[in-house]
Image (spheres, grey):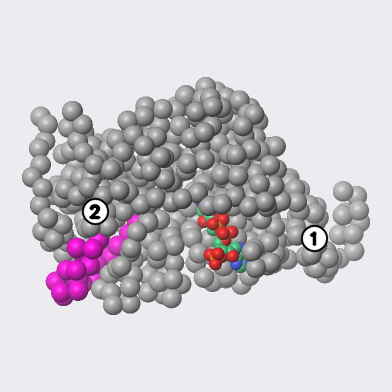
Amino acid sequence: MKKTYKPVSAEEAVKAIKSGDRVHIHAVACFPQILVNAMCERARRGEIEDVTIQHLHTEGYAQYVEPEFENIFNLESFFVGGNVRKATQAGRADYIPVFLSETATLIYQDICPVDVALVQISKPNQHGWVSLGTSVEATRAAIEKAKIVIAVINKYVPKAWGDAMMPLDYFDIFVEHDEPLYEAHTPCITEIDTKIGHQVASLVEDGATLQMGIGAIPNAVLAELGNHKRLGVHTEMFSDGLIPLVEKGIITGEEKMIDKRRIVASFLMGSQALYDFVDDNPMVAMMAVDYTNSIINIAKNPKVTAINSALQIDLTGQVCADSIGTLHYSGVGGQVDFISGAAKSIGGKPIIAMPSSTLKGISKIVPTLTVGAGVVTTRPEVHYIVTEYGIAYLYGKSLQKRAKALIDIAHPSYREELEKAAFERFGSHYYYISKKI
Ligand code: COA
């Protein structure tokens, strides 16, 4: 039997949240701002306290991390996004280091139990099913496990297919509110990004299955794939840069072994054009993160080419991608899931691509990681490192050969300093090795 619903106001809906509850919030563009605001208003009136919040990267105004809510709301995010970064670095909010593939596991196994889930969904279709739209990630697990699910029904949430589709009876309390989703506009592609994009594109083979994240480098890579053929996509997220390749018939998914001819992702971040692209589009399967980021699933597709980025890499190939020293900048995310899955796929290529230095001119290739920096991808997991100066292939290489390969793609103004550090670390044998290469 099709469930019907009777909407209430946001203020009424969030009365279901009690002091001491753990609240899961829908991520990225589907962040239900109206419910978050109403929840914070209740705290301001002293009606709730000691509420723990969890979510992946969200867009929007995360006002629960403002100083006025310290010790009233306790954020334990699975990824440190821009809107909670300062609070996390200041210690007012906290972060749970976890592989993206396992965020749903934490919920399913009651390690992070959910009392209330705040989500945003599409209008029901003719069969009484709704869509989680641009963001399925661990939120589907939270909906399945929560004691109470409060849903904003919003006509702007696209009716994306896949795990995103759920029958209305999973949801308990409804608020009707039509508001465009948060948009992320594609950052400008710089000359350096284009050079990196070109290097990475040279590693992408026809028939490859791509994974790439958000930001300038993925778009720069996509912009260089105009002459490729029969590409597929199995990723945790994608952005606007993919659409022209679908329209030109370059992304067909015909060589994939699972989800053939489908683009598989768990969340999206981009412009309204991207959200329109996934609306009622059977080519796109929006799946739960324990499906997209499962190493076993990733490895089933051929030539998986995983393109991720880094904040810092040391001369032995340790990749820091989540913190700048002790300051948490982002999270482990899906980097290790896809690096490992790509390594196990037939013909797969795990790639870390980054500019050789920051905009401020700091080298990203360093003798040793800054104290407190977190290693996300470890030495044995790393394969290709790409900068605007070339490609270093580290897999199966000794420490000294890695150092030489990385120095060759470092910014030229740091190469001498790095050579000196390599010599100090490895001794004269390093010169013998580096001359042989
Ligand atoms: N030392 C000091 N500061 C550094 C630095 C370094 N070595 N490297 C980067 N920074 C600073 C930059 O200057 C920039 O500062 P700003 O915010 O003040 O402008 C900031 O750190 C971000 O650097 P940037 O190069 O712009 O990062 P990005 O947007 O390309 O993201 C990661 C890079 C590594 C943070 C991002 O890829 C990430 O979060 N990865 C982990 C998760 C993951 O890989 N998931 C899978 C794909 S979705």
Q: Residues within 10 Å of mark 1 (few under 14, many from 20)?
A: few
Asked if residue 289 is positioned above or below residue 366 in the image, the reply reads above
Q: Using the rendered view, name the quadrant where residue 324 is placed.
A: bottom right
Q: Start and end of the magenta stretch?
A: 36-55
Residue type, mark 1 in image: Pro
State how far apart marks 2 and 1 are (Cα). Answer: 50 Å
Q: Residue at x 66, y 55 (%)?
A: 355
Query: Dot 2: what SS?
Result: strand
Query: Which label belongs to residue 412?
Result: 1
Total of numbered circles in the picture?
Answer: 2
Q: Residue at the location (90% across, 64% down)? A: 428
Quadrant observed for ligand 1 in the rendered image: bottom right
- The residue that appears at 50% across and 64% down in the rendered structure is 329
Residue 197, compared with residue 88, is above or below; it is above
Give the residue at mark 2. 118
On the question of residue 5 being in view, the answer is: yes
